[in-house]
Image (cartoon, rainbow, N blue to C red):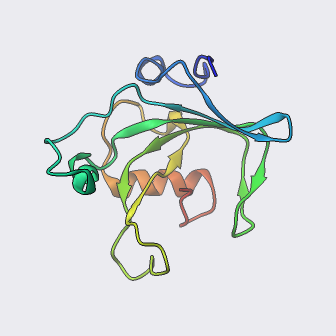
Amino acid sequence: MEKEPPKDIDASIRAKLQSQAVQLLDGEKPAYEFWLCSEIPLQSKPASTAKALDAVKETTLLGAVSVATAKRDYRDDELPAGVYTMRFVLQPQDGDHLGPQNTFTSQPWSRPSWTPNPMASPITKSLVKASAKAFRPTIPRF
């Protein structure tokens, strides 16, 4: 639907977002609203469709999400209402992320105000730390 990104987001980030929101509804009300970036910069031309994510630099801004009211996730942790940015990261290959998933990419959410320069590309460790800080200690929200 046609809807401008929230004013809670820094103007430098809002300028990168589409004016179309994707809504996930809970009954008649939006539970989540997503604004995706108009363009995703690539490091190089993808070798194939299967290798397309290899061309995206870690911590690239993907979009923003608005959570209308506090929710609970699959671990029964609280997801506070608010506005978050979404960035591209690779799952750490440290043994803590084993399971049935066959993908090693994720999109951690963090408050847009966590960095003084919202368009900077933070290092992955800082991004995951900021996402964990916004939610439950040591566990970022993806």
Give coordinates of residue 40: x percent, y percent: 32, 34
Give coordinates of residue 43: x percent, y percent: 17, 41
- The residue most toward the front is 49
Instruction: Choose between 45 and 33: the one closer to the eye.
Output: 45
Which quarter of the picture shows residue 141?
Answer: bottom right
In the picture shown, does residue 36 fall above or below 79? above
Q: In which quarter of the image is the N terminus?
A: top right
Whether residue 64 sits left or right of residue 74 in the image: it is left
Instruction: Choose between 2 and 88: the one closer to the eye.
Output: 2
Which quarter of the picture shows residue 90?
Answer: bottom left
Instruction: Choose between 113 and 107: the one closer to the eye.
Output: 107
Which quarter of the picture shows residue 117?
Answer: top left
Whether residue 37 sits left or right of residue 85 in the image: it is left
Give coordinates of residue 60: x percent, y percent: 33, 41
Whether residue 110 sits left or right of residue 95 in the image: it is right
In the picture shown, does residue 74 fall above or below 87? below
